[in-house]
Image (cartoon, grey):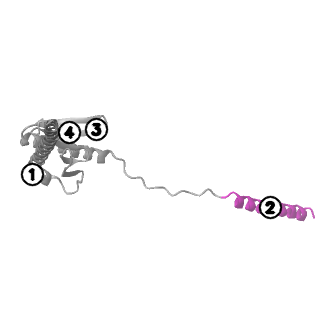
Amino acid sequence: MASNGTKPAEEAKPQRLRDALRQARIEAADRTGVVVELRDAEVARLEILNEALDPLFAEIPVGIEMFDRGISQGDTPRLWIDMVAHVAMGRDKRMYRFVQDTRHGRVVLAEAHDVPTIVKAVTDYIARRMIEREHALVTMPAPQVPTPVKRPRSRFWPFVFGVIFGVIGLFALALFVSVRGH
């Protein structure tokens, strides 16, 4: 009977571990599902903001190609405005955070729970960037037309001609002196 008493105890331990592992897997799947749902909610909020920005981007002149708007998916979904500025969701997943990467680090330009506030901040940002572009184009020096490089003249031929004219001159002087002396 001792073997009968130990056998159920041995089976009970693996059964409990198996149940605990099963429960842990279920909880992990639930957490993963929640994370996926939160990410989907972030992307949905960014898509709402993206649609709200459509009229603003429609006003940007055709020749200005500084802005490249789009939603990037990943661990942290982002709505990119240009190469250095984007909107991401805050830690609470309800607050929009508009940031710009600078050479001195990341700068938060605006934070808000409502779309119109972020649309206004993005509008102001785009206006400033367009003015910066205009100033850069005005202050840029005009492209310089390269001047043709003059090859240095050879000094050989002037020397040869000098020797020839010198010899001719001496010959003429000798001829003149000999004719005069007669």
Q: Nearer the viewer, mark 4 or mark 2?
A: 4
Under mark 3, the amino acid is Thr
Under mark 2, the amino acid is Gly
Q: Mark 2 and mark 1 in contact (Cβ < 8 Å)?
A: no
Name the image quarter holding residue 6. top left
* Label disc, if present, on residue 99 of the rendered structure: 4
Q: Nearer the viewer, residue 109 or 11?
A: 11
User: Could you tell me how far apart the alpha carbons at marks 1 and 2 are, in whole angstroms?
Assistant: 93 Å
Side of 154 relative to 93 (left or right): right
- Give the residue displayed 26% in from the left and 39% down from the top: 101
Q: Main secondary structure of the magenta part?
A: helix
Q: Which is nearer the N-term, disc 2 or disc 3?
A: 3
User: Could you tell me how far apart the alpha carbons at marks 4 and 2 are, in whole angstroms?
Assistant: 86 Å
The residue stretch that appears in magenta: 154-182
Side of 85 relative to 120 (left or right): right
Name the image quarter holding residue 126. top left
Which residue, given by chain and number where applicable, does mark 3 sit on?
Answer: 102
Side of 151 relative to 114 (left or right): right
The residue at the far front in this view is: 1
Determine if residue 124 is in view.
Answer: no
Which residue, given by chain and number where applicable, does mark 1 sit on?
Answer: 51
* Other residues around mark 2 within 10 Å, as few (<14) / some (14–19) / many (≥20): few
User: Could you tell me how far apart the alpha carbons at marks 2 and 3 are, in whole angstroms?
Assistant: 77 Å
Image x and y of residue 173, in percent: 84, 60
- Work out whether 141 lies above or below 156: above
Image x and y of residue 7, in percent: 16, 40
Determine if residue 152 is in view.
Answer: yes
Q: Which is nearer the N-term, disc 1 or disc 2?
A: 1
